[in-house]
Amino acid sequence: MLHSMRQFQFFRVLRSLGFVFWLSLPLIGLIFWLGSGFVQDRILSHSYYNKKYLQADTQAARQMMKRIVAIKVEIRQEDGVSIVNVKTNNSVLKKIAFEFPVTEPSQIEASLSQELGLPRDRIKKLIRY
């Protein structure tokens, strides 16, 4: 009986010191830590692909490409690549550089036509090798 009375007093002292509160803090912290890690993984793995913005950027780029004034190509046969510098009269975008893994002029013109969204005949008029 003395042992159970002593144990009861011990719990009473612990309760008066707020032992239940202090014991629960690490458990609450652990729950928040695990929960925030789960939420962080979900947010960071979420794809923010928004097609509207990409279409708007593509349209603006196409408008800029229509202002092209010169295209200079440097063919590096030993490397198997062509370095293309495109000059525009746009105030924001003055130069554009491309590197294509082709060295044939017809392939370069086709690649440029596709990248710039311009017809090949316009590319042929502007290009200098």
Image (cartoon, rainbow, N blue to C red):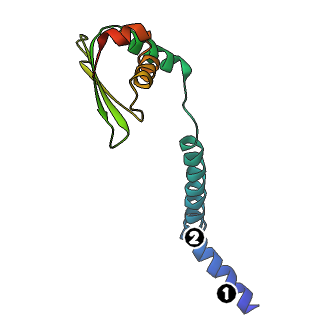
Question: In the displayed image of the protein, which residue is found farthest to the bottom?
Answer: 2
For label 2, the residue is: 19
Kindly state the secondary structure of the residue where label 1 is placed: helix
Residue type at mark 1 is Arg
Residue situated in front as seen by the camera: 120 or 92: 120
Residue 32's x, y, as percent?
57, 54
- Residue at horizontal 41%, vertical 17%? 116
- Residue at horizontal 58%, vertical 61%? 30
* As drawn, 105 above or below 6: above
* As drawn, 18 above or below 90: below
* As drawn, 35 above or below 22: above
Mark 1 vs mark 2, foreground winner is 2
Residue type at mark 2 is Phe
- Residue at horizontal 39%, vertical 15%? 61
Task: Determine which quarter of the picture holds residue 34.
Answer: bottom right
Quadrant of the image containing the C terminus: top left
Residue 15's x, y, as percent?
60, 70
Quadrant of the image containing the N terminus: bottom right
Residue situated in front as seen by the camera: 100 or 45: 100
Kindly state the secondary structure of the residue where label 2 is placed: helix
Question: Is residue 27 toward the left or the right of residue 55 in the image?
Answer: right
Question: Is residue 8 toward the left or the right of residue 34 in the image?
Answer: right
Question: In the displayed image of the protein, which residue is found farthest to the right?
Answer: 1
Task: Determine which quarter of the picture holds residue 18.
Answer: bottom right
- Residue at horizontal 53%, vertical 17%? 52
Residue situated in front as seen by the camera: 32 or 117: 117
Task: Determine which quarter of the picture holds residue 23.
Answer: bottom right
Residue 97's x, y, as percent?
30, 27
Question: Is residue 85 toward the left or the right of residue 56 in the image?
Answer: left
For label 1, the residue is: 6
